[in-house]
Image: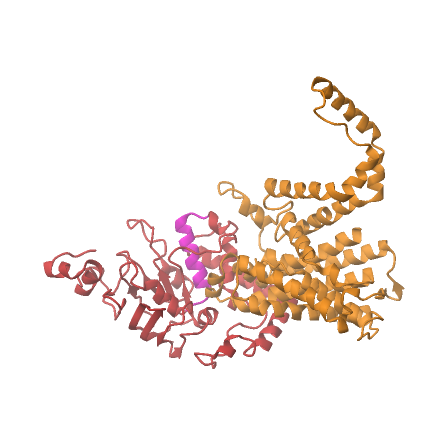
Chain colours: A orange, B red
Amino acid sequence: MLVFVALFVVLGLGLNVVVGFAGLLDLGYVAFFAAGAYTMGLLTSPGSPIDAGLNFWLILPMGILIASAVGLLLGLPVLPLRGDYLAIVTTGFGEIIRLFLINRDDLTRGSQGLSAIPRPDLFGYRIDSFTEWFYFVVAAAVIVGFCTSRLRDSRIGRAWEAIREDEDVAAAMGVNTTKYKLLAFASGAAIGGLGGVIYAAFIGFISPAAFSLQVSIDVLAIVIIGGMGSTPGVILGSLILIGVPRILQFRETSDFLANLGWLRDGLNGLIGAVDALTPGSIGRLPPAETWGAQLADDTRFIIFGALLVIVMVVRPSGLWPSSRRRLEFAHDDAPAPAPVTAP
Amino acid sequence: MTAAELIVDGLGMQFEGLTALADVTLRVPPGEIHGLIGPNGAGKTTFFNCLTGFYRPTSGAVYLSGQRIDGLPPHVITGLGIARTFQNIRLFANMTVLENVLVGQHQHIPVGGTDILSTRRPVYPTAVERLLILRGFPRAAVNGVIEIAGAIARPPRVRAAEAAAVSRARDLLAAVGLRGRENDLARNLPYGDQRRLEIARALATRPSLLLLDEPTAGMNPRKPPPWSASSAASATNSIPPSSSSNTRCASSWASAKTSPSSITAAKSPRAPVAIQRNPTVIEAYLGTRAIQGGGHAAP
């Protein structure tokens, strides 16, 4: 479970470059994730027609490269688009990639997917258990986080931010907006590809169903809930958006809730008291044993959705906004000290 | 950068059937300050947009220091030495004051090859070339990868370039009177300071020609203009500005709006009063009867 949290941190950091830094609303992010995963799958799965049995560490840079190329492929046609239009086109792009994976079944084995993708070795030691995977993916997330924060505090980062603020003026200041937008797409895609390669190696089985629009939306939600442009925000966002639903799914959670019989009795007592005043107005709570199951099914998403709405209303700049965003949402009369750009 | 000569030859700009500029011809010799005046809608900003690559003129040509620049993309023209400010201030509102100036220095921070495309490229590239897929793409890709690697690894070369840029940005800000506000968000500055910042940002591109689009708009005419641009320019050993303004502060020559063409311009006498009495100017602002009536000077 935590492996997924870490994996989505990686993806969130990648999308953060595109959406948070450069301000390009990309809803097709899953395409890059899929590109990385399928690079790994196609080159290592015994079921793949082009299985080359390559090493994970060889495929990692290949996956990153291929994903960047896919990023450029998306970037070129959408260059003149802004805002809502960009979101629509990128959504379509994500779907195209998924449909491509389903329909080119001579290559990708379509909906059957690719299975038995081998796990990587690290210095002759096979990364196998969940704990090992967790540390492995966290290490990847740390490296990616370091890279993106370095990028933010550089000439590229400033150029991206300038494009986000006002693309025309950025061009008038000498920024080649075409080039920097493409760089944003490519870097974001590269990180998505990295996530994809890791995902395929971890799960061992990939099929187009895993690369639905929902993934793009989840990653975007992580970035927005956490705070656009903020690295710690992405981590927090991933913990909440990916972690919490899975915690609610846990058997342990169900068991825990099942042990709340005393709470139910207490609440039912309270309800009984109210009931005595206005007979028949409210029913009793169901047995606590069923709470967990209910949470896992239907109620879970309602609770989850409500949480998201509350977060966005209470903290519109995200849970852990970047220092700059915090300034933006602050009112003009309280100019907080801004971070000094590193000389 | 040394001052450059601007020559505009028969420039025209048409939007679908609307003629915004027709046959604009003028010459701005190096080192001179020129003004461009005209009533609202005369096409002053359109003219600036044509000079800076925001618009692609539909006819005529623009030369900077002898090189033809019309039709080039904005960032290339900026690299060749034209900087501009905007009529309605357009700062990077959510970036700090210092960062705004750093973005202006973009092409002068040597961390990944320059973005100035080859000057040998044709002025009007074909549709295929405009797609940028063929022309300059591999080099831009290589430069991009170098720049990304440099930004992540931050070798001494990159650190030094960044430090130099920051120090120059501070100098520029001090020159326009914004010392100490480096870390404020641009949008939190008062109006006059925003104008100053826009000028500092434009100067950061190291222009040989500075175009100020209504630099005194919204300012109090009794106070000294916020944009002692020439003083800022001399402080940073740049250039003579060229400006466009509706206010009387600008020295200048005139434009006439007689349908359908809008601006014609020529060379400049300096004194504002002479301009105010110029029949062409009076006709442009007040119509022909004002001239026949005589005497009405200032618009």
Image side of residue A170 versus residue A190, left or right: left
Q: Where B105 falls versus B222 (above or below)? A: below
Q: Position of residue A36 (x, y in %)?
A: 73, 66
Residue at image position (67%, 43%) is A305
Q: Position of residue A254 (x, y in %)?
A: 83, 40
Q: In the figure, residue A201 lies in which quadrant?
A: bottom right
Q: Where B280 falls versus A133 (above or below)? A: below
A259 or B102, which lies in front? A259
Image side of residue B207 versus residue B34, left or right: right
A50 or A341, which lies in front? A50
Q: Position of residue A167 (x, y in %)?
A: 50, 61
Q: Position of residue A230 (x, y in %)?
A: 64, 52
- Most common SS among magenta residues: helix
Q: Quadrant of the C terminus of chain B?
A: bottom left
Q: In the figure, residue B132 lies in which quadrant?
A: bottom right
Q: Residue furthest top?
A: A277
Numbered range of the magenta stretch = B189-207
Q: Quadrant of the N terminus of chain B?
A: bottom left
A272 or B61, which lies in front? A272
Q: Residue furthest right?
A: A125
Residue A191 in view here: no
A271 or A164, which lies in front? A271
